[in-house]
Image: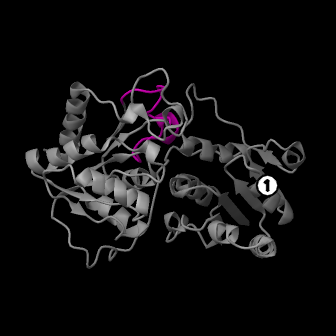
Amino acid sequence: MKILVMKFRNIGDVLLTTPLIDALAMTYPHSRIDFACNAGTQAMIEGNPNISHIHVYERDSLRKKGLFGRIWGELKFINAIKKQRYDIIIQTTSGDRGVIIARYAKAGCIVSFLPKNRTLARFVTHPISLPNLGYVPHTIERNLATLSALKCEIPKRKAVQIYYPDSALDGVSLPEQFIHFHITSRWLFKCVKDEIMAELIDFCELELGIKVVLSGDGSEAESAKIASALALCKSEPLNLNGTLSLKQTAALAARARCFVGVDTAIMHVAASVNTPVVAFFGPSGAFEWGAWDNELSENGYKARNGVQKMGKHTVFQKSWQCVPCGKDGCDGSKISRCLVEFSADEIEQIKAEIRLKAGV
């Protein structure tokens, strides 16, 4: 049997499909499982022993081509999938693209959330329904609902996994003990006020006596954000912004005493290597996107907002009525007030949690 799992979203979304991949491998032990994803996200799947091949969709490069170049690129991509003659094609989102690809590839079993387009919805042979858990399901639980659509049992073990070589950090000079900070997101409205992050960095370095190592994607926007925060620091943390690959960042997180950062893919990476996480959430719901504890089998983020924990991980989020709003900042400002306004008591609570997770 040949199975294809598709996730045409972002880095963190792809990483959070790994519990489904693991479950499919256990459910269909003699099958071949392949994966399809956007370029730039495949590092989350590369090296996974349950994946035989990754179809990489060059979304950004295709957008830069002319009309005929885009059409040719699209046809080349979906024909490569069609040639594999998959028995089961799974799309864990509700978009149209996956259903169109699965239909074109003539898969006998198409598993997906139903798209809004009624014509395309008819092609879904096994529609995914959200489980009735008594709370909003986490993205991992949404992905695993695929198994129910296939009339298969959902396993208790729901571990997020990323694979990287032991040599990933060879040549990278690191302190023996450190706390990993990742203070940026490609969506800057998810970022905490620079003054707050600078204060937390100084707290770790000057009060806890533990070195801080920062990571970032090296983009102009994220580099400027990091530079702004570091300019406010009294300490001198190690800034590795733009110098590490995603695999190296996973290895970095695995060595850290704990992780401190915002709601971004690297938060999920840190949780996947079982490093205690302190995360800041604003417009997004922790109930869907909170750092997942691999030792637990059920979502720990059941409240709509507020400070919540799941095992070794803690999410700080305002308990305001407007949170989470799902918007890109307040009043179109690209700035989220819930990530800017912190009381002295809140900051002390955050510091206490960092101290606890760092084991000081």
Quadrant occupied by the N terminus: bottom right
* Residue 174 x/y as whole percent: 20, 68
Tell which residue pokes out farthest to the bottom in this image: 171
Compared with 24, 144 (above or below) is above
Q: Quarter-wise, where is residue 32 in the image?
A: bottom right
Compared with 321, 132 (above or below) is below
Whether residue 294 is in magenta: the answer is: yes
At x 68%, y 43%, the residue is 148
Colour logic? one colour
* Residue 112 x/y as whole percent: 74, 48
Relative depth, front residue between 231 and 80: 231
Which residue is labeled 1 in the image?
A: 99
At x 50%, y 30%, the residue is 324
Span colored in magenta: 284-307
Relative depth, front residue between 218 and 136: 218
Left or right of 272 in this view: 111: right
Disc 1 secondary structure class: helix
* Residue 281 x/y as whole percent: 41, 38
Residue 106 seen from this side: no
At x 41%, y 48%, the residue is 294
| Number of numbered discs overlaid on the protein picture | 1
Badge 1, how many Cα within 10 Å: few under 14, some, many 20+? many
- Magenta residues, dominant SS class: loop
- Residue type, label 1: Val
* Residue 303 x/y as whole percent: 46, 25
